[in-house]
Every structure is written in structure tokens, then in C-alpha cells.
Amino acid sequence: MTSRVILISAAISEALREARFDDGSPVDASGLRAARAAADAGTVPVGGHLWVSPTVRCRQTAEALGLEGAVEATELAPLDVGRWRGATLAEVSAKEPEAVGRWLADPTSAPHDGESVRAFCDRVAEHLDAAAGQDGRTVAVVEPEVVRALVVRVLAAPETAFWRVDVPPLTVTELSGRAGRWNVRAGRPLVGPT
């Protein structure tokens, strides 16, 4: 049995534009326009199973894309950055430069009292393993770091590679596989510039 998981990264938000750790901010107006344009163009993949990360931005993106009935998958929640939530990377780097350096270099580190990159990758990979048992196609609207974590895991890359994977808004990453062996097709935009 071959499983196909199609990950759609959420539309742009103010937090993403500002390089701010997500604080529950919604999709901004340009992100909504782009998602609706993709829905209107008919370029949104469909699947028998629909999942959505439990963030405002992902739920709004799924709605704008016309993906009704998506099941909230708490296992696909974004990386928990603890007390850094809502701050910009520049702000945190100015206050806690050693902690940021440790966090970026060591996947087991969680100086923000949240989740380490390793624990995050493990969590989302477990959810992917569950998807492998489902026949057919699954579509999930997720935060960019969820895509990063899954790409790292399916390629068996070291967790330090997490920071080397760029995931633009409203792009599609496809994972297909069976028996624990996945292939990756990354970076297809849903729609051109609006």
C-alpha cells in the first residue's frame, strides 16, 4: 500500500513577516488573497483525509483554500518555543544570545522551556507513521516547521538540518511511500504571485 501525504504550508502572517515566534496571529490580507486565488484556480490538492495544524493561521488557510472538514491534528502543532512565543528572533537574541546559539546548534536543547527540535521532529514523525497505515491521499495544512521536521525525518537527515530547510508560505511538499520508506517532492507553489 502506498500512502501519499501532501503538506501545504500556511499562508503568510504578520508574525512570519516579522520573524516573530508565532503568537497565534492570523493570516494577513495578502495571505488570504493568495490562498483564495489558489482555490479559485483549482490548484489545491484534494485527498480522502484532511488534517490541519491547530493554529489560527492554519485553520484560516485551510478555510480559504476550500478544504472543508479538516480534522485538527494536535500532533502537527508547531514547535513549542515556550517563553519566546511572540518575540522576534532579534529580540530573543539580544536578551539571551547564548541560549539562542545553544538552541540553534543543539537539537536536544530547549532553553526557552518549550520543546527541543529533536522532540518536535519525533512528535510529527509519529503522526506521519500513523498516516502510512492509511491508504490513499492525505492533505494537511501545517506550519512551515512541521514541513521542515518531516523532511528531516523522511530523509534521515541529522536534526541540525532542520534549520537548513526553507518552506515558503502556500507551497506543497509531497511525501509518498510505504513500509517506512518515503520519497519527497518539495516546494511547488500553489499559485503564482498575486
Image (cartoon, rainbow, N blue to C red):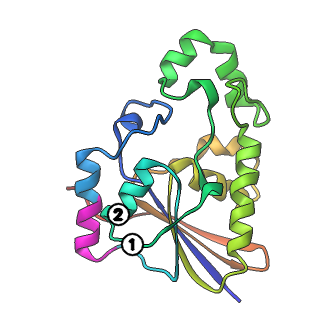
Along the line of sight, the residue nearer the viewer: 125 or 62: 62
Along the line of sight, the residue nearer the viewer: 51 or 46: 51
Report the quarter where the C terminus lies: bottom left
Residue pushed farthest bottom? 1
Up the image or down, 3 lies above or below 118; here it is below
Count residues near mark 1 (Cα–Cα under 10 Å), then give few for <14, some for 14-19, many for 20+: few
Q: Are marks 1 and 2 in contact (CB under 8 Å)?
A: yes
Q: Position of residue 41 (x, y in %)?
A: 24, 74
Viewer can see residue 84:
yes
- Residue at 51% x, 47% y is 166
Magenta-highlighted residues: 35-43
- Residue at 69% x, 32% y is 114
Up the image or down, 28 lies above or below 184; here it is above
- Residue at 36% x, 73% y is 44
- Residue at 76% x, 58% y is 156
Q: Is 50 positioned to the left or the right of 56 in the image?
A: right
Helix, strand or loop under label 2: helix
Badge 2 is on which residue? 63
Please state which amino acid type lies under the numbered disc 1. Glu
The answer to if 32 sits in the magenta stretch is no
- Among the two numbered marks 1 and 2 on one chain, the one whose residue lies closer to the N terminus: 2
Along the line of sight, the residue nearer the viewer: 173 or 136: 136
Report the quarter where the N terminus lies: bottom right
- Number of marks drawn: 2
Badge 1 is on which residue? 68
